[in-house]
Image: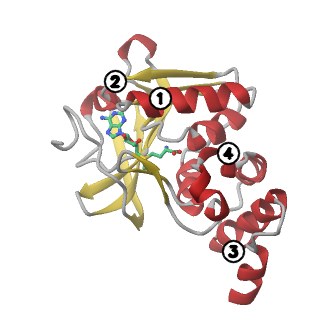
Amino acid sequence: MIDRIRSLQSPDQPFDDRRRAMVDTQIMTRGIHAPLVLEAMSKVPRHLFVGSDAVERAYYDMALDIGMGQTISQPYMVAVMTELLGLNSTLRVLEIGTGSGYQAAILAEIVREVCTIERIESHTERARHRLNDLGYTNVRFRTADGSVGWAEEAPFDRILITAAAPDIPQPLIEQLTDGGIAVAPVGARHTQQLLKLQKSGGDIVREFYVPCLFVPLIGQYGWQE
Ligand code: SAM
């Protein structure tokens, strides 16, 4: 298996083949089977979301540096979070932590509209240009502290936090529709678990999934810088 993965990641291999191999060997074999998630991850050109120094590693089974101390998440983690959101084409999604824009593109392949917030302006602008160049017209960008959400655009059917939070911030829970789902890496600053929170009537149901390690959510309802 290791040899197969290595040969599928050879530098001479076209990016389409590497992306197919990523989906086969890193995502399907780990139990992700939602067709919309697999389709989106087979389509979005991840190598266009990393710097030129990281293009050869774009389809490796790892998070990669995107500058300013931030990362594009490991493909498997993107797939798990996307699957946990239970998406369809009618939904509006809020993403906190635009980063490279890769996760926003995956969401935009599946849902009606994505609103994405990033606190570092240069990341917002780079992601905005990438998604624009790739023809996405259903993504709205904002540079701000996403830990307080985006009240003017609320409510959202789904909310995804792609940075590590002490817990899912209360303003975000308030900005979820009834029946809405929020997913976030939650826990201590250097070790977290994926949390799926579902709002239903007056009830909040919390379920924990895989362990993970994300860069911190910095802001009013996150960590101090
Ligand atoms: N989703 C990204 C992608 O597809 O490339 C990866 C996100 S990266 C792991 C986490 C991002 O969250 C970083 O770009 C970081 O600057 C951003 N971030 C941290 N705290 C934030 C906050 N309070 N509001 C908005 N973005 C925040």
Identify which residue, 85 or 70, lies in the foreground.
70
Mark 1 → mark 2, Cα distance in angstroms: 10 Å
Q: Which residue is mark 2?
A: 144
- Left or right of 91? Residue 195 is left
Report if residue 90 is visible in the image: no
Q: Indicate yes or no: mark 2 CB to ligand 1 under 8 Å.
A: yes
Q: Nearer the viewer, mark 1 or mark 2?
A: 1
Q: Amino acid at mark 3?
A: Thr
Report if residue 73 is visible in the image: yes
- Left or right of 47? Residue 156 is left
Q: Amino acid at mark 2?
A: Ala
Q: Which residue is mark 3?
A: 29
First in sequence: mark 2 vs mark 4: 4
Q: Is residue 53 above or below residue 123?
A: below
First in sequence: mark 1 vs mark 2: 1
Q: Which residue is mark 1?
A: 124
Please rate how many residues cluster around mark 3, counting C-alpha atoms within 10 Å: few if below 14, some from 14 to 19, many from 20: few
Residue 85 image-quadrant placement: top right
Mark 3 → mark 4, Cα distance in angstroms: 25 Å
Mark 4, secondary structure of its residue = helix
